[in-house]
Image: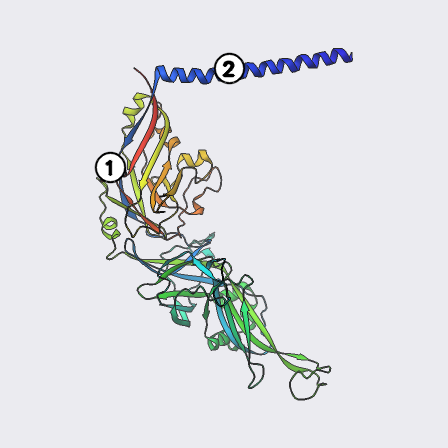
């Protein structure tokens, strides 16, 4: 029985080996056969198609619940001026109590920069950082104003309370009282805060406060007297009884840049806060220690001055505004009067409610469908305009269907928002930007199928943001978030046909030899 069973196993094993060999030979034969058929019956070609393209304005973009917020002023010769304000609510500890006889020492708004620490410290031993994600001149002063927010930030849509309110970059906000106004410029060395403490008359101590990673932060000193009035002198306990009560009483902070030029900072705000450093009195038995400096050591219930800090994080609703001024910028004429019939020589793409490019592929679908092409690839090339003002450009652009504001098929089939490409290619020697390349093979292939009755859609080109990625396989709508301000000028279609750097679509295909 055992011998018969083992013989059966051997037979099955040998049969499987033989079958695998046959399959392998068959695969090899098929591969060779395809090559032979291709050489004899089919021909691989490519064709270049023109694209009519021009720049269009983006009136506003969504600015709430972002990973990054903008603040500041930036002048760009290509794109003009952008001015970005910022508003935020504050978190509160329910039942907040400043204790007995509180005195405010310092009030600081603390906002971390994006920064990178260098391997070598400064000559004085302090950490050496480089500030990231800042556009413009970091050495130029401009005015920054911080106010108590007067505009109430609704959580629910006032027109439809069943829905959450969405905030867009063209909204306006007003301030109730100015808490700070002064000259500002980014400071990579702003890594420490010094807080003066006054415990007794004539006595003074200084606390040095730093983050654990010693990284630099923006520090706006707010008006102590005004904060003391708002939070202590004129505040009722009911104002701190709930988050809703507090947001009605103290609606938040409004940050406004003022001036004609400076720098625009990208900031996370998730780790930003308003910090109130104060002292209060805590009744304590001395028990052998002279706590009040009167020479006695056995006083009961001595009022001991104690250092305190109240941290109110930026939380709840946070939003930016983007104000644009294109006067005198190169983009002005291209945006105000685009040639939508013949296209343009230059295309301007910038985030933060800036500009996008609209593309119209010139293909006679019926003619090509009749040829019954087998599409091997469809590549869209966009070359960067070569000038000195076009260096600080986006690392990736995003292409989508402008007719219905939806993802292209290739994004869905690749199951990845970056599957269609759009990454910036740079010169290996100079690091100068060269081009963006998109693969839209599946989109074009579906259109050119012989049984297809689809029409070519207008395509739109925007600066890429992580929120452009679909949330699920059935999520096909492109969301209108746009907080990255970097812009790029791209060569359009109004160049000679012999110019390889003009905007074009190349389709690679296989057709049957006649």
Q: Is residue 24 visible?
A: yes
Image location (x, y in percent) of residue 240: 55, 68
Image location (x, y in percent) of residue 225: 47, 78
Q: Quarter-wise, where is residue 174 in the image?
A: bottom left
Using a 10 Å C-alpha cutoff, classify the residue at mark 1 as few (fewer than 14 neighbours), some (14 to 19) or many (20 or more): few
Q: Which of marks 2 and 1 is nearer the N terminus?
A: 2
Image location (x, y in percent) of residue 443: 37, 32
- Find residue 26 and name its label: 2
Instruction: Single out the residue that lies furthest toward the front.
Output: 123
Using the image as rendered, state which of residue 42 and residue 273 is in the foreground: 42
Using the image as rendered, state which of residue 271 and residue 100 is in the foreground: 271
Q: Name the residue under label 1.
A: 499
Left or right: 234 in relation to 386? right
Q: In this view, does 434 lie above or below 176?
A: above
Residues at marks 2 and 1 touching, judged by CB atoms closer than 8 Å: no
Left or right: 29 in relation to 367? right
Image location (x, y in percent) of residue 358: 30, 42
Callout 2: helix, strand or loop? Answer: helix
Q: Quarter-wise, where is residue 362 in the image?
A: top left
Instruction: Single out the residue that lies furthest toward the bottom.
Output: 295
Q: Is residue 426 above or below residue 439?
A: below
Q: Is residue 50 above or below residue 169?
A: above
Using a 10 Å C-alpha cutoff, classify the residue at mark 2 as few (fewer than 14 neighbours), some (14 to 19) or many (20 or more): few
Q: Residue at x 44, y 47 (%)?
A: 467
């Amino acid at each position: 029985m055992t011998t018969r069973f083992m013989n059966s196993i051997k037979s099955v094993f040998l049969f499987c080996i033989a079958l695998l060999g046959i399959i392998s030979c068959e695969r090899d034969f098929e591969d060779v056969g395809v090559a032979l058929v291709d050489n004899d019956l089919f021909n691989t070609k490519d064709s270049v198609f023109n694209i009519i393209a021009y720049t269009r304005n983006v009136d506003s973009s969504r600015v709430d619940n972002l990973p990054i917020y903008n603040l500041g002023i930036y002048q760009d010769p290509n794109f003009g001026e952008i001015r970005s304000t910022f508003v935020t609510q504050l978190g509160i500890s329910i039942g907040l109590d400043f204790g007995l006889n509180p005195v405010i020492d310092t009030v600081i708004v603390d906002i971390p920069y994006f920064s990178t620490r260098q391997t070598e410290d400064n000559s004085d031993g302090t950490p050496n950082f480089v500030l990231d994600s800042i556009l413009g001149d970091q050495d130029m002063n401009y005015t920054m104003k911080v106010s108590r927010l007067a505009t109430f930030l609704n959580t629910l849509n006032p027109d439809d309370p069943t829905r959450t309110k969405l905030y867009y970059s063209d909204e306006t906000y007003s301030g109730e009282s100015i808490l700070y106004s002064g000259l500002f410029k980014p400071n990579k060395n702003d890594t420490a805060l010094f807080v003066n403490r006054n415990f007794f008359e004539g006595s003074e101590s200084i606390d040095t406060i730093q983050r654990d990673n010693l990284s630099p932060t923006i520090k706006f000193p707010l008006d102590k007297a005004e904060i003391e009035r708002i939070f202590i002198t004129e505040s009722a306990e009911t104002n701190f009884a709930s988050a809703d009560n507090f947001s009605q009483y103290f609606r938040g902070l409004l940050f406004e840049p003022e001036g004609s030029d400076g720098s625009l900072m990208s900031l996370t705000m998730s780790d930003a806060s308003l910090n109130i450093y104060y002292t209060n009195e805590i009744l304590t038995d001395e028990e052998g220690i002279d706590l009040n400096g009167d020479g006695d050591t056995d006083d009961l219930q001595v009022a001991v001055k104690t250092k305190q800090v109240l941290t109110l994080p930026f939380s709840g609703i946070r939003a930016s505004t983007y104000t644009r001024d294109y006067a005198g910028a190169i983009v002005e004429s291209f945006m105000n009067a685009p040639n939508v019939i013949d296209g343009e020589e230059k295309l301007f793409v910038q985030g933060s409610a800036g500009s996008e490019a609209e593309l119209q592929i010139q293909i006679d679908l019926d003619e090509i469908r009749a040829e019954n092409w087998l599409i091997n690839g469809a590549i869209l090339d966009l070359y960067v305009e070569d000038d000195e003002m076009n260096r600080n450009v986006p690392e990736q652009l995003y292409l989508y269907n402008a007719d219905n504001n939806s993802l292209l098929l290739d994004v869905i089939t690749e199951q990845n928002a970056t599957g269609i490409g759009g990454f910036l290619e740079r010169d290996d020697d100079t690091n100068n930007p060269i081009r963006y390349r998109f693969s839209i093979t599946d989109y074009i292939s579906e259109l050119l199928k012989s049984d297809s009755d689809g029409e070519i859609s207008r395509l739109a080109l925007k600066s890429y943001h992580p929120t452009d990625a679909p949330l699920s396989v059935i999520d096909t709508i492109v969301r209108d978030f746009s907080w990255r301000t970097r812009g790029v000028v791209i060569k359009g279609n109004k160049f000679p046909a012999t110019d390889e750097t003009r905007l074009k679509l190349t389709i690679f295909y296989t057709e049957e030899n006649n």
